[in-house]
Every structure is written in structure tokens, then in C-alpha cells.
Amino acid sequence: MHSQNPPIAHRDIKIENILKKGNIYKLCDFGSSTTRIIDPKKDDKNFVLDQFSSFDKYTTFMYRPPEMCDQYCKYLINEKVDVWMLGCVMYTIMFKKHPFQDAQKLAIINAHYFIPFEDAEKFYSEKLLDFMRIMLTPNPSERPSIVDVLNMIKNWNNLQNISLNVIKELKIFNQQISKFFCLNKYFN
């Protein structure tokens, strides 16, 4: 969906909207999906208010990223909302509890959640915990894209750790690889 032109944001990814049959997973409930990017800094104020009203009606509050909870933060609202929601799903699967289950709007805006047990590293590697944390980055301009997430998964065994720098390094690496292959087709 994110690779379409323009990208399609699902905007309501949650455990209940992921179906499983055998080893096949499918996403359902596309009622909130859109190609519309909302820029609270530039868009008409009434339009932005209408959009936030529709978020209240058609999306699940505890899965919403900060940019869909607080119109005053003026973050761009695009397909990266789905990455935040995937981070919430991952947290829920790992800890059997939602990161913002009892949280208020302020906790979501500040990404204020906690790992439910101190010895989480006994069950999950620090790299896996950081992978989840990076998806729950409150500022969408610093949050990885789905391409970044997929590249981290593809290169999992080669990554020493997960950080914002890893995303930048993977982007540079992928640009270099694609340039290499583009050049090779001219020389072969």
C-alpha cells in the first residue's frame, strides 16, 4: 500500500484487523484508508478539524500516533501513521498488553509507555526492543518508513543494533546498491 503512487495509509492497523490462516496474514478493514496527506501547517483549519473529527469516528484511539491525536503539534499526517500502529501491535504481541491501553492523549503524544517487566532482555534482545521502540518514535519525520522497517527485517542478521542512524545507513546502502545495479546494466 505504501509503495503505491500516491501511497495508501491504512490508518487503523490493530490486532483485530490482522487476520491469520495458517502462516498467512492479511490486513482487513480498509474503511479508514486514504491517499490524502494532511499538513496541519498548510491545510485549511476547518479541513484539519474535519479530519481530526473523522479520526475520532473511524480510528482506534489507543493505536493512533501523536500526529493523529494532537492537531497542535502540526506534524504531517501520512502513511507513517501505519508504522506507529505496527509498533503498537508488536508491543501488544510481545507484552500481551497495549502500550497505551490505559493512557491518556498526553501519553501518546509523548510516546510515554513502559516495558512491563524489568528483565525484558531475558525474553527479548535489546535489538528487538529497539526495533519496536523506533516504530514508536513520536515525531513522524524521525519515524522509519515501512521501507526502512522492511530493510531492517531483511538485514536483521547484519545489524548490530537498531537506532535512527541505522535507518540512515540502510538508506545510503540501498541507494548505493541500486546505483551499482543501474551502472552494471550499462556495462554488461
Image (tube, helix red, strand yellow):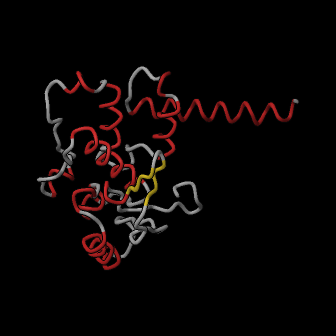
* On-image quarter of the C terminus: top right
The residue located at (29%, 31%) in the rendering is 129
Q: Judge from the rendering whether residue 53 lies leftward or rightward of residue 186; answer left or right.
A: left
Q: Quadrant of residue 31?
A: bottom left
Q: Quadrant of residue 76?
A: bottom left
The residue located at (14%, 36%) in the rendering is 116
Q: Is residue 40 above or below residue 79?
A: below
Q: Is residue 9 above or below residue 133?
A: below
- Find residue 123 and report its horizontal and vertical position in percent: 25, 25
- Find residue 178 and report its horizontal and vertical position in percent: 68, 36
Question: 172 and 126: which one is in front?
Answer: 126
Q: Is residue 84 above or below residue 47?
A: above
Furthest residue to the front? 22
Question: 177 and 97: which one is in front?
Answer: 97
Q: Is residue 131 above or below residue 3?
A: above
Furthest residue to the right? 188
Q: Quadrant of residue 127?
A: top left
Q: Judge from the rendering whether residue 160 lies leftward or rightward of residue 113; answer left or right.
A: right
The residue located at (11%, 53%) in the rendering is 102
Q: Judge from the rendering whether residue 179 lies leftward or rightward of residue 21; answer left or right.
A: right
In this rendering, the count of numbered labels is 0
- Find residue 45 and report its horizontal and vertical position in percent: 31, 75
- Find residue 150 and report its horizontal and vertical position in percent: 50, 40
The residue located at (33%, 52%) in the rendering is 85
